[in-house]
Image: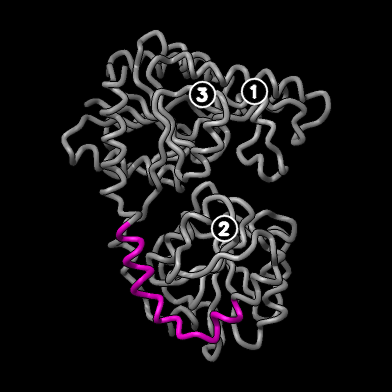
C-alpha cells in the first residue's frame, strides 16, 4: 500500500514521533510511506518521502488571519493546493491525518480533494480539535457544546460565538468523504467523538499510542540524577512531567505545591516543564522543559513515584513513559488516565480531589516501590509496544480500503 501521513511535525514532539514511528515501521513492512509536515522536522537521513507543506510566511499569515476569524485550518489555501498536486502524483491508497491545527492547512481544499478522489482517510484524534468548532480541549471549560454544534462557545468572546458555529459546520464536511475512519488514542476520546458528526464514519476505533520499550531501559544511576539536580539523597523522589506548569493550569501545578508543603520532609518533588508561575519552595524543584529523551528517561527511572494530576489527558504519554521505566503512577480517575493506570502499576484517585491525591502519594512513600517495577514494565510491553500498535494501524488502513 501507499500511505501518506499529514501532521504538523515529523520526528519532533509527541505526534511527530508517532508519525515517524509509523513511517519507519510501514517501510519495514514493505509499504510505500510518505509524510508531509509543516512546522518542525527531524529527518537526519534526508528521506525524500518526508516533505514540507507551506513556508514560514504562509504559517505566520495563517496565524494572523485565524486570530481575526477563528478559522484555524481555514487558510493556507495555496499551500494546500500544492499538497493536493503532490498527492495526485503519489496516488495514495490511504491518507492518514494527524494534527492539522498548526496554521498550515486549508481543510475545505483538502477534504474536497479526498472526497473527489475517493481516497480512504484516517483521522487520529490526538485531541478534540477535529470535532469542535474552536478548542482542542473543551474539558478545560467543562463544555460539551460539541454535542450540539458548538453553540454559545464559552472559550471565545460574544462576537466570535457565531464564527465558532460556522467553523464546526465546515469541519463536519469530513463526513462527505466516502471512506473515512477515525481513531481515538483512548476509549473515552473515541466515545466522545462518536457523539458528533464523526459518528457517521465507516470505522470508529481506538489504537493507543506507544513507547519504544528498548530505549526506556537505558538508565543512569539514581545517585547521578540526585547529584545533577541537587536533591537530598535521604528523601524519595516524586516526578511530574508536562509541557508547562502554573498555579491555575489544568495539569495540576497547584496540587504539587500543596503536596510539597506537606511532604517536603520525606520527598523531593521535581517538575519537568516550562515554569509559568510556580514559585520554587523547599522540596519543590522546577527544572524547566527538556526535549532530551535520555534526561527524561533518567528522571523517570530514578523517581520513586510519578504523579499525574492532570484534569484531562487524551492519552497520557508521560504516564506510560514513567511505567516503561518501572515507576508506579498516581493519577486522577479521569479521561485517558483512567484507562492507563491499572492495579499493580499505581493508583487512581477521585478526579480533582487534591487531599486524596496527597494522602495516596504519602501512602506510597511508605511502601517498597521496587515491588511495582516488574509489573509496570511488563504491563507497558504487553499493551503499548510500538511495533504491535503500528501493525494495528496497518490493519486499519487495509480494512478501510475494503469497506463498502
Query: Which residue is identified by label 3?
Result: 105
Range shown magenta: 361-382
Give the structural element (helix, strand or loop) at label 1: loop
The residue lying toward the viewer, choosing from 329 and 43, is 329
Give percent across and percent down for residue 401.
28, 22
Query: Can you tell which of label 3 and label 2 is closer to the viewer?
Result: 2
Q: Which of marks 3 and 2 is nearer the N terminus?
A: 3
Q: In this view, does 267 lie above or below 289?
A: below
Q: Identify the residue at horizontal 72%, vertical 42% (top origin).
A: 141
Residue located 77% across and 28% down the image: 152
Number of callouts: 3
**In this picture, residue 112 sits left or right of residue 286:** left
The circle on residue 290 is none
Residue furthest to the left in view is: 30
**N-terminal label among 1 and 2:** 1
Residue placed under numbered mark 2 in the picture: 242
To which quarter of the image does residue 6 belong?
top left
Q: According to the image, label 1 marks what residue?
A: 71
Which one is earlier in the sequence, the residue at label 1 or at label 3?
A: 1
Q: How far apart are marks 1 and 2 (CA)?
A: 27 Å
Asked if residue 123 is positioned above or below residue 127 in the image, the reply reads above
Q: Is the magenta stretch mostly helix, strand or loop?
A: helix
258 or 172, nearer to the observer: 172
Residue 147 found in image quarter: top right
**What is the x, y in percent for residue 259?**
68, 75
Q: As drawn, is 143 to the left or to the right of 371?
A: right
The residue positioned 45% from the left and 24% from the top of the image is 201
Dot 3, crowdedness within 10 Å: few (<14), some or many (≥20)? Answer: many
Residue 103: x and y, percent?
A: 56, 29
Amino acid at each position: 500500500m501507499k500511505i501518506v501521513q499529514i501532521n504538523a511535525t515529523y520526528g519532533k514532539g509527541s505526534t511527530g514521533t508517532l508519525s515517524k514511528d509509523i513511517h519507519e515501521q510501514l517501510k519495514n513492512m514493505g509499504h510505500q510511506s510518505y509524510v508531509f509536515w509543516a512546522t518542525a522536522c527531524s529527518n537526519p537521513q534526508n528521506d525524500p518521502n518526508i516533505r514540507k507543506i507551506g513556508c514560514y510566511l504562509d504559517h505566520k499569515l495563517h496565524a494572523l488571519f485565524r486570530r481575526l476569524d477563528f478559522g484555524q485550518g481555514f487558510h493556507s489555501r495555496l499551500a494546500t493546493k500544492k499538497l493536493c498536486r503532490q498527492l495526485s502524483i503519489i496516488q495514495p491508497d490511504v491518507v492518514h491525518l494527524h494534527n492539522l491545527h498548526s496554521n498550515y492547512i486549508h481543510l475545505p481544499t483538502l477534504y474536497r480533494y479526498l472526497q473527489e478522489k475517493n481516497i480512504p482517510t484516517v483521522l487520529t484524534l490526538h485531541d478534540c480539535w477535529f470535532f469542535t468548532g474552536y478548542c482542542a480541549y473543551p474539558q478545560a471549560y467543562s463544555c460539551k457544546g460539541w454535542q450540539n454544534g458548538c453553540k454559545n462557545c464559552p472559550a471565545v468572546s460574544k462576537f466570535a460565538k457565531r464564527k465558532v458555529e460556522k467553523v464546526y459546520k465546515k469541519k463536519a464536511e469530513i463526513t462527505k468523504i466516502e471512506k473515512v475512519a477515525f481513531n481515538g488514542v483512548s476509549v473515552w476520546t473515541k466515545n466522545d467523538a462518536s457523539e458528533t458528526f464523526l459518528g457517521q464514519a465507516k470505522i470508529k476505533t481506538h489504537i493507543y499510542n506507544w513507547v519504544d520499550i528498548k530505549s526506556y531501559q537505558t538508565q543512569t544511576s539514581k545517585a547521578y540524577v540526585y547529584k545533577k539536580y541537587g536533591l537530598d539523597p535521604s528523601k524519595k523522589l516524586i516526578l511530574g512531567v508536562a509541557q508547562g506548569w502554573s498555579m491555575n493550569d489544568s495539569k495540576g501545578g497547584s496540587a504539587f505545591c500543596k503536596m510539597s508543603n506537606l511532604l517536603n520532609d520525606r520527598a523531593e518533588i521535581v517538575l519537568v516543564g516550562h515554569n509559568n508561575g510556580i514559585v520554587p519552595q523547599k522540596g519543590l524543584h522546577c527544572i524547566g522543559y527538556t526535549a532530551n529523551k535520555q534526561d527524561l528517561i533518567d528522571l523517570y527511572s530514578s523517581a520513586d513515584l510519578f504523579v499525574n494530576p492532570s484534569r484531562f489527558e487524551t492519552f497520557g504519554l508521560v504516564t506510560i513513559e514513567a511505567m516503561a521505566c518501572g515507576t508506579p503512577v498516581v493519577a486522577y480517575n479521569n479521561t485517558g488516565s483512567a484507562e492507563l493506570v491499572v492495579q499493580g502499576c499505581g493508583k487512581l484517585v477521585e478526579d480533582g480531589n487534591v487531599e486524596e491525591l496527597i494522602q495516596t502519594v504519602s501512602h506510597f512513600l511508605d511502601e517498597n516501590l521496587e515491588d511495582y517495577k516488574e509489573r509496570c514494565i511488563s504491563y507497558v510491553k504487553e499493551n503499548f509496544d510500538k511495533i504491535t500498535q503500528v501493525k494495528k494501524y496497518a490493519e486499519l488502513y487495509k480494512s478501510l480500503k475494503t469497506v463498502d
